[in-house]
Amino acid sequence: MKTIQYDPLAGTHIQEACKESVAAAINEKQNVQFSFNGVDLTATPKSTPKQLEAEFDDKMNESFEAAKARTAEILRKQRSVNTLLDVLKDVIGDLDKLMLWLKYFTEDADDVGAQFTKSRLTNELEESNWVLERAEE
């Protein structure tokens, strides 16, 4: 079945967008695809506005839950990176411990959400004679 696009006007409420898209799907005997607040929806000739609105609500809730989970993941990784930087001076003299530290650090620091300052890491390495000269920046 062919799909046509519907573009709700700014200020349109989700209830109205669902009614309009379902009406268009029934009148045109085609699916009607549209995006509302970043959520993609498709009305079919068999859809009802209430079903479509419920689908929108479900997708918004899923998006919210995914955002909460991602925030929790970033917080966990940030705490891990901070803790690992705090203990670096305690493990830097033992190559086996340092390699394990590096494994954990790269796993959590390699996330756009986790942040650390390069100077904190390089200063600790320089003070422990792991870096003899700082490269020109």
Image: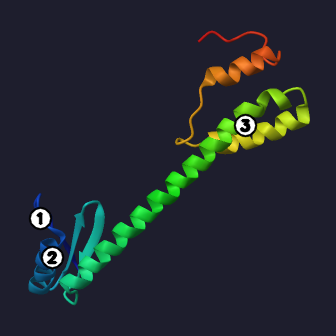
Of labels 3 and 2, earlier in sequence is 2
- Tell me the quadrant of the picture where the N terminus can be found: bottom left
Cβ atoms at labels 2 and 1 below 8 Å apart: no
- For the residues marked 2 and 1, what is the alpha-carbon distance in whole angstroms? 12 Å
Q: Amino acid at mark 2?
A: Ser
Give x and y (percent) for residue 108: 65, 44
Q: Which mark is residue 12?
A: 1
Q: Secondary structure at mark 1?
A: loop
Q: Residues within 10 Å of mark 2 (few under 14, many from 20)?
A: many
Of labels 1 and 3, earlier in sequence is 1
Cβ atoms at labels 1 and 3 below 8 Å apart: no
Q: Amino acid at mark 1?
A: Thr
Of labels 2 and 1, earlier in sequence is 1
Kindly report which numbered mark, 2 or 1, lies closer to the viewer in this rendering: 1
Q: Tell me the quarter of the picture where residue 24 sits.
A: bottom left
Q: Which mark is residue 21?
A: 2
Q: Secondary structure at mark 3?
A: helix
- For the residues marked 1 and 3, what is the alpha-carbon distance in whole angstroms? 49 Å
Q: Residue drawn at (59%, 31%), measured in percent from left and top?
A: 116
- Image: 75 above or below 116: below
Residue ID for mark 3: 84
Kindly report which numbered mark, 1 or 3, lies closer to the viewer in this rendering: 3
Q: Residue drawn at (22%, 84%), measured in percent from left and top?
A: 50
Q: Amino acid at mark 3?
A: Leu
Q: Residue drawn at (67%, 43%), measured in percent from left and top?
A: 80
Give x and y (percent) for residue 122: 69, 20
Lateral position of residue 37 relative to residue 114, left or right? left
Q: Residues within 10 Å of mark 1 (few under 14, many from 20)?
A: few
Give x and y (percent) for residue 54: 29, 79
Q: Tell me the quarter of the picture where residue 124 sits.
A: top right
Task: Pick whichever, 117 or 21, lies toward us.
Answer: 117
- Image: 20 above or below 131: below
